[in-house]
Amino acid sequence: MTIPHAQLFFGPKGSAKLALALAFAQYVACANKQQDDACGTCPSCVKHLKFVHPDLHFVFPVATTPNVKTKPVSKNFLSEWRSLLDENPYFSLFDWLKHIGVGNKQGIISVEESSHILKDLSLKPYESETRIMLIWMPEKMNIQAANKLLKIIEEPPQKTLFLLVAESTENMLATVLSRTQLLKVPRHSDEEVLNYLMNRGVEQVRARMISNLVDGNINDALQLVEYVEDSEQNALDFVQWMRLCFSALQVKDINKLVQWSEMMAKVGRESQKSFLLFASNVMRDALLKNYGVEKMMKMNVSGHNFTMEKFAPFIHADNCMEIISELNLAQLHIERNANPKILFLDTSFKIARLLHKKLNQVSA
């Protein structure tokens, strides 16, 4: 079977795209291939499992750090890359840049990196028949770097395989994209996340709670394992928040909303993310309730003198996606260490405005 020389593993955050690319690289180099997997025990597999095979080259976004002050390239960060891969192959770009300590800088794949790629691929393989160049987050490759690699991606040296792993194709150079075979990796199902967490020793009730929150994102699931709040507490906080948002136009309740935001600012970053994920899922459930698809609902927010029957009518086609977008944006800002008190207060006012937005009913 002929293997395409350039493949793009493309999937959402927290999907198995990087894990699949690594498994495929291991399979290609395996000296004792099984019918549908690598053997896992030959010398090649052992090195691939430790991410140290000499014919497996890694490229990923980097930036200057206190230890790497000029012209940073992937080779400067291989030990950090391998340690994070070993810990969690579902990590995000934000996790990676935080891991190497770049501060607020943006990670890129530079033209300097392209020169290193061309040099590496000019050498013969050390042990395997095939050299593999795995480029993670190629959408962070600048134009100069991409243009420098176009020819070698289109016509690589013999026995050379490019594996690109991306979250978004929108910012990739079209000429690079057209030279790859696209392999779409779907997000995980809730059941797959549940089984993954239970296999890692998370007890079933907690694993179920987390899998319901993360929309198939295993990286989020792993981060929430240690920090996720009890669902009862998230429900209490959500009910209180929505009531305050509904009455936010009154001065006395604005003061209460400020106090609520101060309270949420104290619970810790991962717990804040857990709460925002919980809120996003409740909004989704409310929309499902409106469309009569109760069997697909995940969250339990009954009690506390609150019912989904009363709340759901306020979440409709003209505001649901905007509300979820604001909640997702709040999660992103929490990850980037925004001031949580200001963030929750600002998000509250936006949610309050959207909750009062009427459904635009157009008569047929």
Image (cartoon, rainbow, N blue to C red):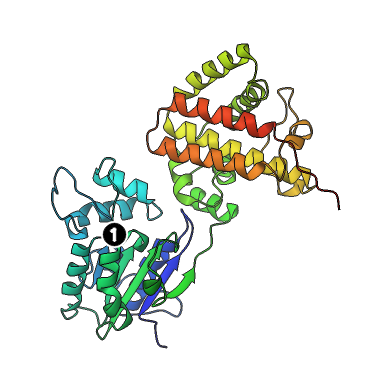
The single residue placed furthest to the front in the displayed view is 363
Q: Callout 1: few (<14), some (14-19), or many (20+) C-alpha neighbours within 10 Å?
A: many
Q: Quadrant of the N terminus?
A: bottom left
Work out whether 177 lies above or below 310.
below
Up the image or down, 341 lies above or below 21; here it is: above
Front residue (pair 44, 251): 251
**Is 32 or 189 nearer to us in this picture?**
189
Q: Is residue 334 left or right of residue 58?
A: right
Pinpoint residue 2: horizontal percent, then vertical percent. Answer: 40, 87
Write down the quadrant of residue 222 in the picture. top left
Residue type, numbered disc 1: Phe
Residue at point 30%, 51% (across, down): 84
Is 19 drawn above or below residue 153 in the view shown? above
| Foreground pick, 328 / 120 | 328
Q: Is mark 1 on a helix, strand or loop?
A: loop
Can residue 206 be seen here? The reply is no
The percent coordinates of residue 263 (x first, y second) are 50, 19
Task: Name the residue: 70% across, 23% down.
Answer: 304
Q: Name the residue under label 1.
A: 60
Residue 261 lies, in percent from the top left, at 51, 22
Q: Where is residue 164 in the image (x, y as percent from the top left)?
A: 36, 68
Is residue 335 positioned above or below 193 on the image? above
Residue farthest toward the bottom in the current orientation of the protein: 1
Q: How many marks?
A: 1
